Image: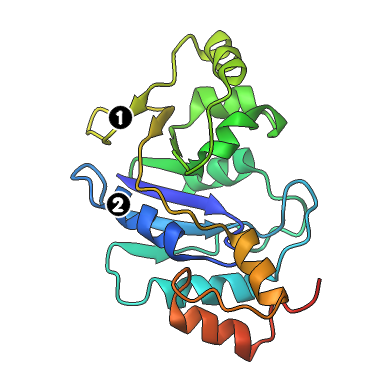
Amino acid sequence: MIGYYGGSFDPVHNGHVGIARFIAGFEAVDSVCFVPAGTHPLGKQISSVHHRMEMIRLAINGIQELSVSDVDSSCESPSYTIDLLTRLRQIEMRPFFFIAGMDNLNHLFEWKDWEQLIRVFSIVFTTRAGQLLDETALQRIFSVIGKKITLSNRLGNDFSGPMLLRVPDYAISSSEIRKMILNGESPSGMINLDVLNYIETHDLYRKG
């Protein structure tokens, strides 16, 4: 089973990589593949997918169980999760699941065709430091799929999703890193050194 880890990753940081390695460490999981969004589905301005792909490659260099895919990078129109997972189902021969942060669980109803998404595909939502579950959101999902989303400490071979997985807490965010760089501060310790060098070389995040 392979996990596809979706997000903007602008930039990818140590928390992203740590969570990916944690999930890849379960016996039921063969590997985790980062899938940076080609564009932001809500129209938010993000760095070019080329830069974000390169930063992920640097961050996971030498980590055998992690990889990165450009399957979503050619999307010029808004990049929706339902469309991405439909494409993956057409090309991926192995069982797969999608990985998203708990903030996405709380705002799932903003996603395109969220009812179909949650019924058809296996999704693992990951806990996040400082994030609380929206009980109203959970009840709404339950009314659609007739299944409670429970908090689990592991991914087993019988996983079918959706579920909320407890992962190590990383008090790091891409937005915080961008803000630090804009303010002339160094996010060392939050981000891979090669990624930080790439950001400096290409003068990323220095303009508001």
Neighbour class for label 2 at 10 Å: few (<14), some, many (≥20)?
some
Count neighbours of disc 1 (C-alpha within 10 A) and say few if under 14, some if 14 to 19, many if 20 or more.
some
Q: Is residue 147 above or below residue 11?
A: above
Viewer-proximal residue, 102 or 96? 102
Residue at 80% over, 51% down = 43
- Residue under pointer 1: 159
What residue occupies the far left of the structure in this picture?
27
Q: Secondary structure at mark 1?
A: loop
Point out residue 121 in the picture as x, y percentages from the top left corner.
48, 31
Quarter of the N terminus within the rendering: top left
Q: Secondary structure at mark 2?
A: helix
The quadrant of the picture occupied by the C terminus is bottom right
The residue under the point 58% across, 46% down is 84
- The answer to whether residue 151 is seen in the rendering is yes
Horizontal side of 96 relative to 140 (left or right) equals left
Task: Using the rendered image of the protein, determine whether residue 92 is visible from the camera's viewpoint.
Answer: no
Q: Residue at x 49, y 63 (%)?
A: 69
From the image, state whether disc 2 or disc 1 is nearer to you.
2
Q: CA distance from mark 2 to mark 1?
A: 16 Å
Image coords of residue 192 (percent x, y): 44, 75
Which amino acid is tagged 1?
Phe
Would you say 8 lies left or right of 58 here?
right
Residue 183, label in figure: none
- Residue that badge 2 annotates: 22
| Colouring scheme, one of rainbow, by chain, secondary structure, one colour | rainbow
Q: 17 or 72, which is in the foreground? A: 17
Q: Is residue 34 left or right of residue 84?
A: left
Image spot of residue 45 (x, y percent): 78, 61
